[in-house]
């Protein structure tokens, strides 16, 4: 994946933060795909959809176009997923170190 450069993180009064990043198109695409997978996994768990029978779809169905707003939401979810995954990896590493 391309480099992801965090330019600035601004803490917000509600405890959240705004992150300003410089992303190459390849990195943006990867984060959007990660966001889509994250959203789908959350929805599959929430709706107990693990046992759906497989389907075959045409390229036109699989190649949907997203609006800027939809892409922005998926980018946001991709960043959230990446942060949570990284935090999970760090937490698992700390737990392993404490055991050993």
Image (tube, rainbow, N blue to C red):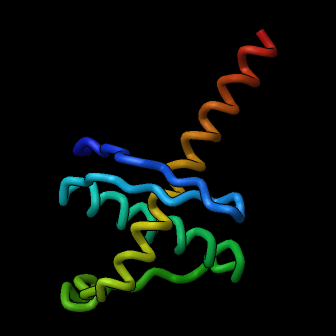
Q: Is residue 25 left or right of residue 69?
A: left
Taking depth in this image into account, of 22 and 1 the one nearest to the observer is 22
Figure quadrant of residue 6: top left
* 23 up-or-down from 69: above or below: above
In which quadrant will I find the C terminus? top right
* 97 up-or-down from 90: above or below: above
Q: Most extreme residue toward the top, as rendered? A: 100
Q: Position of residue 87 (x, y in %)?
A: 62, 40
Residue at point 68% right, 30% down?
A: 92
Q: Position of residue 47 (x, y in %)?
A: 69, 82
Residue at point 53% right, 56% down?
A: 81
Residue at point 62% right, 76% down?
A: 44
Q: Is residue 21 left or right of residue 12?
A: left
Residue at point 45% right, 61% down?
A: 78
Q: Most extreme residue toward the front, as rendered? A: 13
In which quadrant will I find the N terminus? top left
Q: Position of residue 15 (x, y in %)?
A: 70, 58
Figure quadrant of residue 13: bottom right
Q: Is residue 59 left or right of residue 13?
A: left
Q: Position of residue 14 (x, y in %)?
A: 71, 65
* 11 up-or-down from 68: above or below: above
Taking depth in this image into account, of 88 and 62 the one nearest to the observer is 88
* 39 up-or-down from 86: above or below: below
């Amino acid at each position: 994946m391309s480099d992801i450069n965090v330019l600035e993180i601004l803490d917000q009064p509600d405890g959240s933060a705004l992150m300003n990043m410089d992303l190459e198109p390849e990195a943006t695409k990867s984060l959007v795909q990660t966001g889509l997978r994250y959203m789908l996994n959350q929805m599959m768990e929430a709706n107990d959809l693990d046992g759906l029978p497989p389907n075959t779809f045409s390229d036109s169905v699989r190649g949907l176009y997203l609006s800027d707003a939809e892409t922005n939401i998926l980018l946001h979810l991709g960043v959230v997923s990446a942060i949570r995954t990284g935090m999970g990896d760090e937490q698992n590493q700390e737990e392993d170190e404490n055991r050993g």
